[in-house]
Structures are given as C-alpha cells and as structure tokens.
Image (cartoon, rainbow, N blue to C red):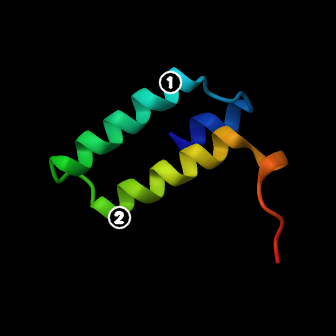
Amino acid sequence: MQKGISSTGVKPETKDVQAMISAIDKAAKRGIIHKNAANRRKARLNKSLIGPATASPAA
C-alpha cells in the first residue's frame, strides 16, 4: 500500500482510503495483522492523504 502511494505521487481519493482502512480493520479483526500494526498503517495512510503542507512542524 505505502509503496503504491509514494511511487506514483498521486494522492488517493477519500473513498479509496476508506476502503483501505476497512480492509486493514478486517485483517486486524481476523488476526492477520496485530491491532497496533493496523492502527499504525491507518495513521500513516491518513497522514499521506493530508500531505506535508498541513503537517505539524517539527519541534
């Protein structure tokens, strides 16, 4: 997922992100990936959707 987003440089649409988050949640629910790993992936996905322009500055 991450490689697909970063390599193309195109931001995914909201409905695509929702579908990816749903798939991640289902995988975590079934025990395919750990709950914390799912949360980390969702956070990174949302961060890539927002982009660096609105990200908080480093302290």
Q: Which residue is mark 1?
A: 16
Seen at 63% across and 49% down, the residue is 47
Q: Quadrant of residue 24?
A: top left
**Image height of 37 relative to 51, above or below:** below
Q: For the residue labelled by badge 1, is the local secondary structure a helix, a strand or a loop?
A: helix
Query: x, y percentage for residue 15?
Result: 50, 21
**Image height of 59 relative to 11, above or below:** below
Q: Which of the image's four quarters has the C terminus?
A: bottom right
Q: For the residue labelled by badge 2, is the local secondary structure a helix, a strand or a loop?
A: helix
Query: x, y percentage for residue 54?
Result: 80, 48
Seen at 60% across and 23% down, the residue is 13
Seen at 46% across and 52% down, the residue is 41
Q: Is residue 13 left or right of residue 40?
A: right
Question: Where residue 51 is drawn, which disc sits there?
Answer: none
Seen at 78% across and 61% down, the residue is 56
For marks 2 and 1, give the CA distance: 22 Å
Query: x, y percentage for residue 44?
Result: 56, 52
Q: Which residue is mark 2?
A: 36
Indicate the amino acid at tag 2. Asn
Q: Label 2 neighbourhood size at 10 Å, few (<14), some (14-19), many (20+)?
A: few
Indicate the amino acid at tag 1. Asp
Q: Is residue 7 left or right of residue 37?
A: right
**Image height of 36 relative to 13, above or below:** below
Q: Quadrant of residue 36?
A: bottom left
> Of the residues under marks 2 and 1, which one precedes in the sequence?
1
